[in-house]
Image (cartoon, rainbow, N blue to C red):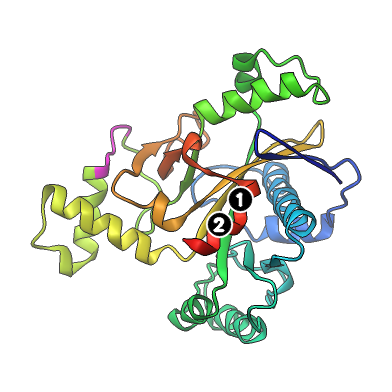
Amino acid sequence: MKLALLKNIACAHYDQLQISEDTVDTIAQNTKNTWQPDRGSGEMHSNTKQGKIAEVIVEEFIRRYYNKQLSTLSYDKIRNDRNEKHAPFDLLIWRTGSTDIRPIVESIRADISNTRDEFVRLSDATRRLCREAGVKIAEVKSTKIRPGLKETAGFNGDYDDHVEVGRLLDAIMERDDIFCYPHYKREDAAPGYSMEDYCRFVRQCEPSLAMYRGEQLRKKVIDLEAEKQCCDVVIRVYLDTAAKRGYVIGWMSREKLLDYRVRFKHMPQKNKSEKALYLTKKLTEVEPIDRISDLFSV
């Protein structure tokens, strides 16, 4: 894999990268359509493989650029479920030499074994171990570079031209988001479903919120979202899988993503993800990936 930095973004050419098709098939076969209806097996395989490529690029970037500072361990190297359950995160990241990762691995494996349905949930004990050891739980969000982004940038398709790629990256940053899914409800068919609607739904789920309305309710719900989300950091990656190019745009801590300025939105893709609900910030607000070590000062 070739890696370089451009505009503080990690640029990867992964033409030699090998991803286990058997592993991808197993994960895809056990993946539920939680937010996008009617995905066929081929699309689910493609989406799963895309996510695995993005994870490998992030790990390889950290290994090459931060090998003396940071260590990583992928969830796939921890899991003990034969790839049959939904993963709650993608990577663990910690300061090299700062902790013994083995108790955390054992705790995660216990959580997997104790999960009776297909969605693995990290226990409070596991999350506490991570906090006390300074281990960050990371999720890698990957997206294919859409034709519309290339058109907006006037991109000519030459990924070896730094000026062209720079314009494409600017278009991605200006138009797109970093995001996570709400904890209490991940989809709703109503096109006008708003943050206020979601807050009222959460109030029904949480008796402790019964007395709150309006802005007070919104603040309480956002605080709960930050508490319930298990990942400490979201890392955003864009891929052109045909050209085998990947771009690690940046990262955002849970605290920054889920503060009072977070936006609530639907995505616009017809018959794909328009029912899905997202908590988002603009990509222009992310921290650059070449400052990933700053995560440990958050």
- The quarter of the picture where residue 203 lies is bottom left
Does 192 lie within the magenta span? yes
Q: Characterize the local packing of mark 2: few (<14), some (14-19) or many (20 or more) Cα atoms within 10 angstroms.
A: few
Secondary structure state at the residue bearing disc 1: helix
How many marks can you see?
A: 2
Asked which quadrant contains residue 220, the reply is: bottom left
Q: Position of residue 41 (x, y in %)?
A: 70, 47
Give the main secondary structure of the magenta stretch. Answer: loop
147 left or right, relative to 275: right
Q: Which of 66 and 49 is in front in this view?
A: 66
How packed mark 1 is, by other alpha carbons closer than 10 Å (few <14, some 14-19, many 20 or more), is: few
- Looking at the picture, which amino acid does disc 2 mark? Asp
Please give the range of residues in magenta: 191-195
Q: Is residue 151 left or right of residue 227?
A: right
Q: Which of 153 and 62 is in front in this view?
A: 62
Mark 2 and mark 1 residues within 8 Å of each other at the beta carbon? yes
Q: Residue at x 68, y 50 (%)?
A: 51
Residue picked out by circle 2: 294
Look at 83% across and 59% down and name the residue there: 22
Q: What residue type is labelled 1?
A: Arg
Q: Measured from the top left, where is residue 175 in percent x and y?
A: 50, 26
Q: What label does residue 173 carry, if any?
A: none
Query: Hey, which residue is sitting farthest left in the picture?
Result: 211
- Indicate yes or no whether the magenta region holds residue 115: no
Residue matched to label 1: 291
